[in-house]
Amino acid sequence: MAELCIKVDQLRVIYNQGKSNEVRSLDGVSVEIYPQEYVIIYGPSGCGKSTLLYGISGLQAPTYGEVIVDGKNLAKMTKKDKVAFHQSSIGMVFQAFYLIETLTVIDNVCLPKVFRGESLAERREAAMKLLQRFSIDEHADRFPSQLSGGQKQRVSIARALVNNPTIILADEPTGALDSESAQNVLDIFKEINDVDKKTFIMVTHNPEHLIYADRVVYMKDGKIIREDVNRDKRPAEAAKKDFVTTPENISNELRLLMRTFKNLSLQQVGVLLIPFKAKQLMTHILSELTEEQSSAAEALLKEFLFKNLDETGFKTRLDLDAEKGGAGWNKLRAISFVDRAQEIVSIASQISKNPEQALITVSDYLIGSYHLKLDDEELLRFRAFIKMRIENKMDRFGLQQRLDFSKKLGGVGLYRGTAEKVVREMELLMLLNYSAQ
Ligand code: ADP
Ligand code: MG
């Protein structure tokens, strides 16, 4: 069975150690990667993905821990060995391409060969083959600045492959590309892994990529928090079977669901299924509308605010089918939406018409909407602060602070979250009331 290709053991990378600005980029990361695996390192920005990749490449030295590649401990390599390692064992691809602008495309691809004592003809031949393979040979004599992003990335992939390394590392390689070029680059990597049998490690924060990998390593705050397996290429004793879901064994039920929910991935079927369900349910409840239904409604709302449309007209149009110039909602939803919009608009309009009365109306409205339970003292303060906001003697932050502060500190003592919501609605009222004349 296959030997380990990469072993990262309790890797820690700490910047500015012991100082006040100490950063633990990697906080004890262990991972084992076998030959010909396609592994994705996935996680939010700043979680340490690049640092892990550079640790594996030997470009970043460990503060603690070990990185062993093809049986060799990177930290114990001589300088000469390391240079050879970078030239022959590892190819790297970056988000920003890192092509040399003053060299032609073909010379960029040849560059890793320059120190290997091959003839110019040999170097160019190898480079040209790769350029042909990735359909960029016609640009061989151009300069990088004359290429599109997708073409530049293909050049940099050719450069990574030119010395025929066994491992390819890619750091957010599609991060700077449009979606078509990104797809093209992902297809190339898939082929390099499948056909050329390279071990391939890619850093990404795009969940749509996860499906390509044999294995996904999830990172957070400098640690690996989870691993998922799509296809196990590891020897049986290394494989953890718990998360295995292979495309062959997915049920028809799941297949049909995946057709509806395009962003439902196999990775989510394990631990992430509940969060996925929650998200779908949440969007459904908050807005059962399609994009067209909601933009049509927004257009009608504009007419309503311009007073080109009255309440009844608004309701009718919301309910009407899209083909007939409506928003395609249903009647009940249309009624409750218009009533709510009307309520907010009419409260807002009182603010300038009758400020004295508005103070009571607005306060009561906010208190009712957010079920605020205020004693007499709190109610007095609440109204006083709303008054100050209505009279523009205080901005939203001032209002929020006073609603949030405890009574002792002179505030109303609302929960922070409630204070925020009340203030947001108050600001909406102020906006609706505002008129430029
Ligand atoms: P990712 O690639 O997941 O976005 P990185 O590996 O680049 O994250 O960085 C991980 C953390 O280490 C971040 O908080 C980053 O700010 C910090 N970091 C990276 N390089 C340095 C450095 N040279 N000096 C100090 N902090 C660094
Ligand atoms: Mg990064």
Image (tube, rainbow, N blue to C red):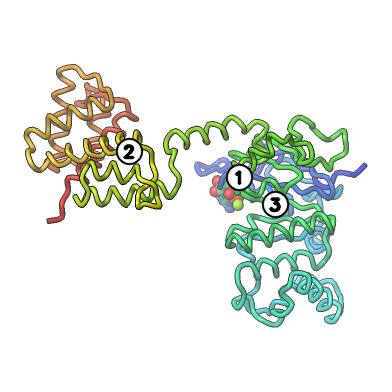
- Residue at screen point 43% across, 42% down: 289
Q: Amino acid at mark 2?
A: Ala
- Residue at screen point 13% across, 37% down: 388
Whichever of callouts 2 and 3 sits on the residue coming sooner in the sequence is 3
Q: Amino acid at mark 1?
A: Lys
Q: Quadrant of the C terminus?
A: bottom left
Q: Residues within 10 Å of mark 2 (few under 14, many from 20)?
A: many
Could you say where residue 7 lies in the image, as x and y percent from the top left? Answer: 79, 43
Q: Nearer the viewer, mark 2 or mark 1?
A: 2
Q: Is residue 417 above or below residue 59?
A: above
Please name the residue that numbered disc 2 is placed on.
334
Q: Residue 202's mark?
A: 3
* Residue at the top extreme, as displayed: 375
- Residue at screen point 33% across, 49% down: 298
The answer to whether residue 272 is left or right of residue 349 is right
Q: How many marks?
A: 3
Measure the C-alpha gap from mark 2 to mark 3.
48 Å
Q: Is residue 280 above or below residue 107?
A: above
Q: Secondary structure at mark 3?
A: strand
Q: Secondary structure at mark 2?
A: helix
- Residue at screen point 63% across, 64% down: 181
Query: Which quarter of the picture shows residue 79?
Result: bottom right
Could you say where residue 142 lies in the image, as x and y percent from the top left? Answer: 66, 81
Along the line of sight, which residue is nearer the eye, 172 or 51?
172
Along the line of sight, which residue is nearer the eye, 34 or 191?
191
The answer to whether residue 4 is left or right of residue 326 is right
Please name the residue that numbered disc 1 is placed on.
262
